[in-house]
Amino acid sequence: MARKSESLREAYGNELVSLGKKDPNVVVLDADLSSSTKTGIFGKEFPDRFFNMGISEQSMVTAAAGLALSGKKVFASTFAVFLMRTYEQIRQSVCYNNIDVKFVTTHAGITVGEDGATHQIIEDIGVMAGLPHMSVIVPVDAVETRSVLRYVHDETVTPYYIRLTREKFPVLNNPDYEYVPRKSVTFKDGSDLTIIGCGVMVSFALQAAEELKSKGIDTRVINMSSIKPMDRSAVVKAASETGRILTVEEHSIYNGLGSRVAEIVAEEYPVLVHRMGMKDTFGKSGKSWELFDYFHLGVPDIVRNAELLFRKEKNFESIQ
Amino acid sequence: MLLETSSWRLKDLEQLNIPETEISRYEEIARQVRISSIKMVYSASSGHPGGSLSAADILTALYFREMNIDPVEPDDPDRDRFILSKGHASPGMYSVLSLRGYFPQELLKDFRKLNSKLEGHVHKGVPGIESSTGSLGQGLGVGVGMALGARLDKKGYHVFVMVGDGELEEGNIWESLMAGYKFRLNNLIVILDRNGVQLDGKTQDVMPLHDIPAMVKSFGWNVIEIDGHDFRQIINAIEQAKSSKDLPTFIVAHTVKGKGVSYMEGNYKYHGSPPASEYEYHQALKELGGA
């Protein structure tokens, strides 16, 4: 099942230009990574509304706050890992003020590849989702990236964290797809088991679901791009209708998609949940697709865990 | 010891002639700010008097003379902006805003109490407050963003930021100084409350900054050094900063921590503690002429 792949960050840069054309209040900041985050595409088109703050993320985030307090619609970008050093600026100057700053980061997760562990942030979802007033979205593909950007620009005035990646991802959505806030998308229905994923892992889950079908396991696959607020009813429905939930993400299992799903399941409809993701470890240099196998997050790993979960066995790989 | 920085001192020739009666009026307001600050921290049994008293004269000059503001229209898009980056000086800040008419003075007595809008550190929910502050080092960066916003909107307003000297130990300050120079933000004016004392002791002992004027100057800013308790110098320095054509301005205002209350002056123990007893409380009010 070969699907076309497209870069999420290029989709971001180009969508910024569209937003900039229709809204003179859109401003963009970057911290010396604009050719990688693709905000440079906006900067070339609108040099007066693009601010390269240098390798000074604290300055970037606080200036973003000041611009938002002046009535601007602000997009601020850098690699996801480097935004984390400004957690407290985001907390105090953006979230506490509850203002219109959208943090769109790229190069999140292990799909950074060869740059290695220093650049592979796998804690960012938890860090950002813990902040009051902050919403967190992980677009699944370039189509959803564009739609999410239009939504947060057109409909919202509060802080957002939008997590993009270095690698191109398979396009799963139709070109006319529109992001609906707080709603997940069920890409494939099923009754035996539900896989809830975000980002590129949703593509893997769809491939795994095909293999599971041949093994007689009817698998539901949900794209949970809205991490906060989360589509609680879809989680509860999956728990009640399929009885087992497997979560998949290129992020730590301790404070990401999986832990949030597990919280909802525990509170509202307790069933067996197994979380696949990074298990309290750092990443590693390598080709990004090799790393999924190395960390047991590839399609065969999803199939194996799903089978174990389906049979209600509990001897999953032990978690360190 | 400071280097010779006389070339950056306020130019005598450009001084405005301000009548003595006007100066006396500001001194009286600043005295009320100090009395109010002491009452607030004593009533709350907590808070930061030292840096409120050191900043009282500068805050008074800004809100009663230098800033283009109207308490009746706190959201006027053309207003000047002020950010108290040293957000712990909330007693002084709230007192000035209240005396200027942003909200009734009777609200001050509920400072730091549950259900009061007057949070322990300055909070945007209070009329006249532009941005919540309290975690040091961030207000200057926010001011950079506001100054960029003014330029994009082709507005003529100025953005004022007050920072503390202990606060200069935060890296965010120096990052934002770089940005202020890069974008040539001549509409941005920073005032340093140089009182020489921070929570744990003298700034010179906790983390010495060898020569602040020279350091900031080397970042490309205009630098002016003044006595931060002399209204003529404060006013003239701000006027000079407003007329800058190409660079942002950093005013080093030398002040005394706890100014006006003898036992608080220069004493780090009163950075973040109210008068320790009823006796101290009444002594403070007596010395400020508010008993």
Image (cartoon, helix red, strand yellow):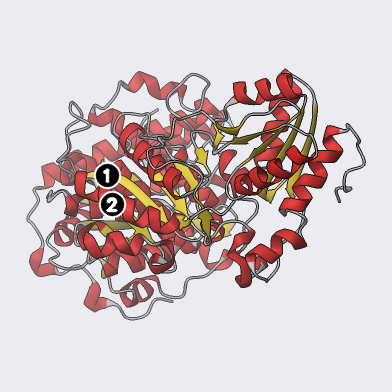
Mark number displayed over residue A55: none
- Tell which subunit mark 2 falls on: A
| Residue B92: percent from left, percent from top | 38, 38
Q: Looking at the picture, does residue B163 appear above or below residue A114?
A: above
Amino acid type of the residue that numbered disc 2 sits on in the rendered structure: Val
B145 horizontally vs B26: left or right: right
Q: How many marks?
A: 2
The kind of secondary structure element at disc 1 is loop
In the picture as drawn, the residue positioned furthest to the front comes out as: A214
Residues B256 and A88: in front is A88
> Which image quarter holds the N terminus of chain B?
bottom left
B23 horizontally vs A81: left or right: left
Q: Are marks 1 and 2 on the same chain?
A: yes
Q: Looking at the picture, does residue A50 appear above or below residue A183?
A: below
> Marks 2 and 1: in contact by CB < 8 Å?
yes
The residue labelled by disc 1 is A72
The kind of secondary structure element at disc 2 is strand
| Residue A151: percent from left, percent from top | 37, 36
Residues A50 and B66: in front is A50
**Residue B288 in sight:** no
- Tell which subunit mark 1 falls on: A
Q: Residue at x 83, y 36 (%)?
A: A309
| Residue B108: percent from left, percent from top | 40, 24
Amino acid type of the residue that numbered disc 1 sits on in the rendered structure: Lys
Q: Residue at x 75, y 47 (%)?
A: A302
Q: CA distance from mark 1 to mark 2?
A: 7 Å
Q: Residue at x 61, y 24 (%)?
A: A234
The residue labelled by disc 2 is A27
B85 horizontally vs B72: left or right: right
> Which image quarter holds the C terminus of chain B?
top left
Q: Earlier in the sequence, mark 1 or mark 2?
A: 2
